Image (spheres, rainbow, N blue to C red):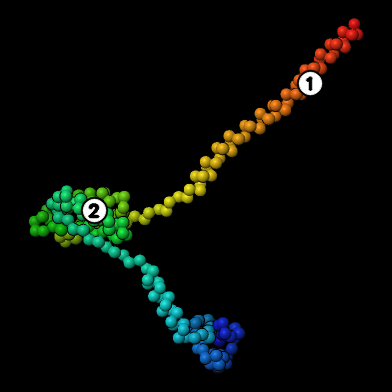
Amino acid sequence: MRLVGDNVEQGIYPTDQARRMAQDQNLDLVEISPTASPPVCRVIDYSKFKYEQKKKTRELKAKQTKVVIKEIRFGPNTDDHDFAFKLKHAQEFLKEGAKIKAYVHFVGRSIVFKERGEILLLKFAQALEDLAKVEQLPKLEGKRMFLYLAPKVVAPPKKVVTKEVDKAKPADKAAKPAAPAADTKEAAPVLEAQGTAPAETDAADQGAE
């Protein structure tokens, strides 16, 4: 078998020798890959290994998000005041991260108003469109019509650093035209010196005459 572990020299050993090596250190010989050729075993403290595995399992369960579903019940003849009251509660539930199961309960012959119930649920979903997305459109199941809503995931805010860099760019562009002005001032004495040259030539010509 192939022996691995922190407390042994890795390599291929006979089974009996591997067992003795584990016993000498008061550890256990655990097969971790029986299908390999040769099989792979590790020298470990098996009790400690099991404890660590259980600890990791508990931590994973604790990190798992529990899905909370809140129910909101309507009637086919729900008035505006009751609608607004339940809408407010739904907004609070969604902000807390809960899902919403809204339904219209039809009693007796009120089932003939199923279209009215569908309109009511669609109105409810539209009023919550800023906070929720529709997971299931209104669907009649028995004497109840259900609508399922889930909270929207809020996108993280954009970094302000990008905006600051963009604001700095116009200032760099505005500073560039200042360079030609400096060149014009330095060139002025050269033009004056060139202008005096014809005057000296005229004086020389007059003297020659």
Residue at image point 51% right, 48% down = 161
Q: Is residue 28 above or below residue 203?
A: below
Pick the front one: 175 or 122 = 175
Rendered image quadrant of residue 60: bottom left
Q: Is mark 1 on a helix, strand or loop?
A: helix
Q: What element carries label 2?
A: helix
Instruction: Say if residue 150 shows up in the picture.
Output: no
The image position of residue 194, as x and y in percent, is 78, 20
Tell me the crowding category of disc 1: few under 14, some 14 to 19, or many 20 or more residues within 10 angstroms, Cα based: few
Name which residue type carries label 2: Lys
**Residue carrying label 1:** 193
**Residue carrying label 2:** 88
The image position of residue 59, as x and y in percent, is 40, 73
Name which residue type carries label 1: Ala
Residue 41 is labelled as: none
Q: In this view, does 106 lie above or below 61?
A: above
Q: In which quarter of the image is the N terminus?
A: bottom right
